[in-house]
Image (cartoon, rainbow, N blue to C red):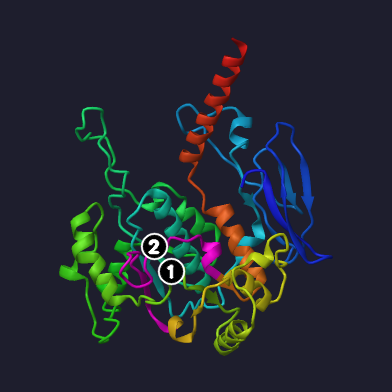
Amino acid sequence: FHGSFLLNDSKSGFSRSLIHPIRHQQQNVKISSSSSFGQGLDVAMFAGSMFNVSIGNKKLGALSCDAFPGGPYDAGARQEMIYWQDITQDENYISPFYDKSDPKFLTFEPDPGGFNNIRMAMEVVLTMAVAMGRILVLPPDQKMYLLNKHGNDEGQESAQHQRAFGFQDFFPMQEMAHHIRGLKIISMEEFLETQGLKGKLRHVETGQVLYPPNNVVDYNSDNNGIETVLNPYLRSIGFGPSDWSSEQCMVAIPAQPGNDEMMTSLFSKMMAQPGTREGTEYVGMPTSVRGSTEERWRENNAARPNLCLYNKEMQSKHVLHFAGKKDLAAGRLLVHSYAFLFFQDWKTDLWMKRFVRDHVRYNNEIQCAAARIVQAIRQYVVQKEQL
């Protein structure tokens, strides 16, 4: 999304996308906003890296590369990689479903596919955890498809080559939790110690207390144990929404607990209305981001026939678990969060998009490596043009 951002015309109610080509001359774009959460931030802003974009008193984030060999040490090369915003008031968001006196959890298994599928599914469960007011439990470090290749040209394993990975190796997970009041992230080991060993986890069908098998809590780098012991255990103590398929529904998040009947009635009304649901009628005429719940839902839901509502019953589950496998509950989460989660409250919808943009990014080490690559390509092109 470099060089483009989506904003809402508050007068006409017409959302439009402004696309600018990357250019070396900075442009200053100012978009007004009020100080309260959500108000005036009619923006899912994907700010171009060559643009200096401010939103009221907000500013682009920062990137430090000093700790990494090769930097880059040039400020312009670092600045070009930054697309995330530093919006202080966004850090105060807490889901209306969050209950400090009765903490609930969301566990998941990484997608078995390539890394972009792994990243996409993680983004979905992360945003669901925030939206539902649940503590996100990170899977233990494990092999990830195509990231456990041999470490040298001879095809032999290298002692220095990392073989097991966790999401914290790629994303600033704890930094996210530190900055966002409504997000808490813990390790699988902590989850099993504080919930499993203390008898707080029960079989989803029988209600029988289930302790971690053999009281083992540390599965880091134990791929066989993860597949044969841990994952089956998590599926037995965590409720898996069996009908939450991104091809059949959107996960509807009410603005507050108790809105179940309202959302169910509204969805039935939507489905009863005649006309196409393929979404073609919105091409060039998107719904305003401040549109009514029905207007926004109809556009985003398109032809998906089912209602997947985060209702009172779902909220009562101590643990929700997403297995991330084709033939298991909810299947693979091969969908972007903004195409799977629908929020009754438009301000929460925009907050979630900003949260993903501003916080669910690669960590500094990876961002700086990308900056070095871009800088090297530019230097190579300049040298070629001089010949």
Q: Is residue 332 magenta?
A: yes
Q: Which residue position is annotated with label 2?
A: 186
Image quadrant where residue 257 sits:
bottom right
The residue carrying mark 1 is 135
Q: Position of residue 65 (x, y in %)?
A: 52, 34
x 26%, y 30%: residue: 152
Q: Residues within 10 Å of mark 1 (few under 14, many from 20)?
A: many
Farthest residue toward the top? 387
Question: In the drawing, does residue 298 fall left or right of residue 224?
Answer: right
For the residue pair 307 and 144, the one nearer the viewer reads as 307
Residue most toward the left? Answer: 214
**Measured from the top left, where is residue 299 in percent x and y?**
63, 70
Instruction: Answer with mark 1 or mark 2, whichever residue precedes in sequence.
Output: 1
Give the numbered dot on residue 322.
Answer: none
The secondary structure making up most of the magenta span is loop
Residue located 30% across and 69% down the image: 327
> Does 307 appear above or below 5?
below
Three-letter code, disc 1: Ile
Q: How many marks?
A: 2
Q: Residue furthest front?
A: 275
- In the image, taking residue 249 as reference, residue 90 lies left or right, namely right
Residue 50 colored in magenta in the image: no
> For this rendering, which residue is in front, 26 or 221?
26
Q: Residue at x 35, y 52 (%)?
A: 166
Q: Quadrant of the C terminus?
A: top right
In the image, residue 220 above or below residue 162:
below
State the image quarter where residue 107 is shown. bottom left
* Image coords of residue 315 (percent x, y): 45, 81
205 vs 95, left or right, is left
Instruction: Give x and y (percent) for residue 18.
Output: 73, 50
Contact (CB < 8 A) between labels 1 and 2?
A: yes
- Magenta stretch in the rendered image: 316-341
